[in-house]
Image (tube, grey):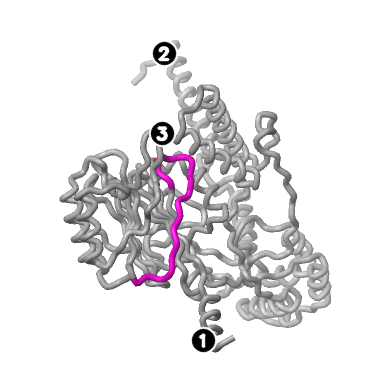
């Protein structure tokens, strides 16, 4: 093998496919389930470009596609339907591109754009209604190419509502204009197929000197338009770098080992100290030292979690079957018997999905011919966590049984030093400084990920602080109740009291006043 061929093979091995899917969905809300199932298939889509989502701004901002973030969108304000949305995988970094008011015009020229910063690629999605003025659209298209990131690589998707398979003056003018910006069309396949026509109104424009790519039509099965999948070959270091997480093994043997170590600890450094802060720091230091020894942090690669629990293998098979039936119905004149079969198939299909999403298990008789699912529980010993002064916080999901067992077993070995610290804390009116520190996590809401205003801060306190707070609350409540310091009309934040008791008490008072008034009137007393 020559040196040049070896280098070429090495460069090719560092390339990975980066897939972008475009689709004219014609109402995203009622197609969301089907879209989620398709995304869980073997397509491995990184970016989704959608036209005609038919949603308003508040609706598109709250719509969630698992594993994806809304990065750019356009919604109509005056006319119905239309709209653009671009979704990207959550691990991709991007920068929102300003949408110019002079460009976007409902029906005529609708666009949304985003720049993927890691791969330095601008993605623009466009839509033009069939009855829109072609000259005005072309003028805005020309303006957009001139002012929106003119020096960066671009991919332009859109439903232009023009048949690129047929010759026309408008088509020639459009292709001539895009060629002047070094853009060329990539699609020459039919993307809208009905019983009466086969057209190509959806088109992708890409720069001539772009990296290797391929495109194909994807049969969606729930829209008049087929989806288009564009696959690029990009450097693997720029695409979704491998994520490493640190986990601890909470197996039964490790829990028993940890309890054994704590049972032999004398806690002299805690009992011999008089300052509450140093007392708790000593306790925390010993506890943390043993914790790190037994429950050692181990690095693990995170695998992409594309599949949702309700999207089973058999639901995917049924989805593919439904898409085939939809395409057959769309392209052929079918009998009434076949129409009823497809209608009944779709009805059962969506019923199975809805029941499976609710219960995550479905064995109904109506679905036996459609889905046969086997469910198997798995026992996970590794839990993603971060450390706290009193052990572990579980960052995602519910605590596993191993972790619950670990904490319940530990209480017999740490209750004495904790009791000593709490008593000194109460007697000296000192709360340990270490427990005043919170872990603040920024949860991304929408928009650019590098803008802090697009995140919601969530503060998580140490588990040990909850112990102090609960004990102090119990003592304070005992003192208040013993000395009757709270009014009987205080219904909030008290045991056996609630808004229900408050309403009941008020109704009783009203009735009591009414009875007293009636007695006064019967006895002839003057009523003022």
Q: In which quarter of the image is residue 450?
A: bottom left
Q: Label for residue 195? A: 3
Evaluate if marks 3 and 2 touch, with contact meaning CB atoms under 8 Å apart.
no
Apparent side of residue 151 relative to residue 324 in the rendered image (left or right): left
Q: In which quarter of the image is the N terminus?
A: bottom right
Q: Would residue 506 be visible to someone looking at this image?
A: yes
Other-residue count near label 3 (Cα within 10 Å), few / some / many at <14 / 14–19 / ≥20: few
Q: Label for residue 204? A: none
Q: Mark 2 points at which residue?
A: 521
What span is colored magenta in the figure?
209-226
Q: Which of 146 and 337 is in front in this view?
A: 337
Q: Which of 504 and 372 is in front in this view?
A: 372
Q: Position of residue 377 (x, y in %)?
A: 74, 51
Q: Name the residue under label 1.
A: 4
Q: Position of residue 496 (x, y in %)?
A: 61, 40
- In the rendered image of this protein, does residue 267 appear above or below residue 59? below
Most common secondary structure along the magenta stretch: loop
Mark before the other along the chain sequence, 2 or 1:
1
Per the image, label 3 sits on a secondary structure element best described as loop
Q: Quadrant of the C terminus?
A: top left
- Magenta stretch holds residue 73: no
Residue beneath the point at 53% across and 56% down: 43
Residue beneath the point at 59% across and 53% down: 307
- In the rendered image of this protein, does residue 406 appear above or below residue 75? below
């Amino acid at each position: 093998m020559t040196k040049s061929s070896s280098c070429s093979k090495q460069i090719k091995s560092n390339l990975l496919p980066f897939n972008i899917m475009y689709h004219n969905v014609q109402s995203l809300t009622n197609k969301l389930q089907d879209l989620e199932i398709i995304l869980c298939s073997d397509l491995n889509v990184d970016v989704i470009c959608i036209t005609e989502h038919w949603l308003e701004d508040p609706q598109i901002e709250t719509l969630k596609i698992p594993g994806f973030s809304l990065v750019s969108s356009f919604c109509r304000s005056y006319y119905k339907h239309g709209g653009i949305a671009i979704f990207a995988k959550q691990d991709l970094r991007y920068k929102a591109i300003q949408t110019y008011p002079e460009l976007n015009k409902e029906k005529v020229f609708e666009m949304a754009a985003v720049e993927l910063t890691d791969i330095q690629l601008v993605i623009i999605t466009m839509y033009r209604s069939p009855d829109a003025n072609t000259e005005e659209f072309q003028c805005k298209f020309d303006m957009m190419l001139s002012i929106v990131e003119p020096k960066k690589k671009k991919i332009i998707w859109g439903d232009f509502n023009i048949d690129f398979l047929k010759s026309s003056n408008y088509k020639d003018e459009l292709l001539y204009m895009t060629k002047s910006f070094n853009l060329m069309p990539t699609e020459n396949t039919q993307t809208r197929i009905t019983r009466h026509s086969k057209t190509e109104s959806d088109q992708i424009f890409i720069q001539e000197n772009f990296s290797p790519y391929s495109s194909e039509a994807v049969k969606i099965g729930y829209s008049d338009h087929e989806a288009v999948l564009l696959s690029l070959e990009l450097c693997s270091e720029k695409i979704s770098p491998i994520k490493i997480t640190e986990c601890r093994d909470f197996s039964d043997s490790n829990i028993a080992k940890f309890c054994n170590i704590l049972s032999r600890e004398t806690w002299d450094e805690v009992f011999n100290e008089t300052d509450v802060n140093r007392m708790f720091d000593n306790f925390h230091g010993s506890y943390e030292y043993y914790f790190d020894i037994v429950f050692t942090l181990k690095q693990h690669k995170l695998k992409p979690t594309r599949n949702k629990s309700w999207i089973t293998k058999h639901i995917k098979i049924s989805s593919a079957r439904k898409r085939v039936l939809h395409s057959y119905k769309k392209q052929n004149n079918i009998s009434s018997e076949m129409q009823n079969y497809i209608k009944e198939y779709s009805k059962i299909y969506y019923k199975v999905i809805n029941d499976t999403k609710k219960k995550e298990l479905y064995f109904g008789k109506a679905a036996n011919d459609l889905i046969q699912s086997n469910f198997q529980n798995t026992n996970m010993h590794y839990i993603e966590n971060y450390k706290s002064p009193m052990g572990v916080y579980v960052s995602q999901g519910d605590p596993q049984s191993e972790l619950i067992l670990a904490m319940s077993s530990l209480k017999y070995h740490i209750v004495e030093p904790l009791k000593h610290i709490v008593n000194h804390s109460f007697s000296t009116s000192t709360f340990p400084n270490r427990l005043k520190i919170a872990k603040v996590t920024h949860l991304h809401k929408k928009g650019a990920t590098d803008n802090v205003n697009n995140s919601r801060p969530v503060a998580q306190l140490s588990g040990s602080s909850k112990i102090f707070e609960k004990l102090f609350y119990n003592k304070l409540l005992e003192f208040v109740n013993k000395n009757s310091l709270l009014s009987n009309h205080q219904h909030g934040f008290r045991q056996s009291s609630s808004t229900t008791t408050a309403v009941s008490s008020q109704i009783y008072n009203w009735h009591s006043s009414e009875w007293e008034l009636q007695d006064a009137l019967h006895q002839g007393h003057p009523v003022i």
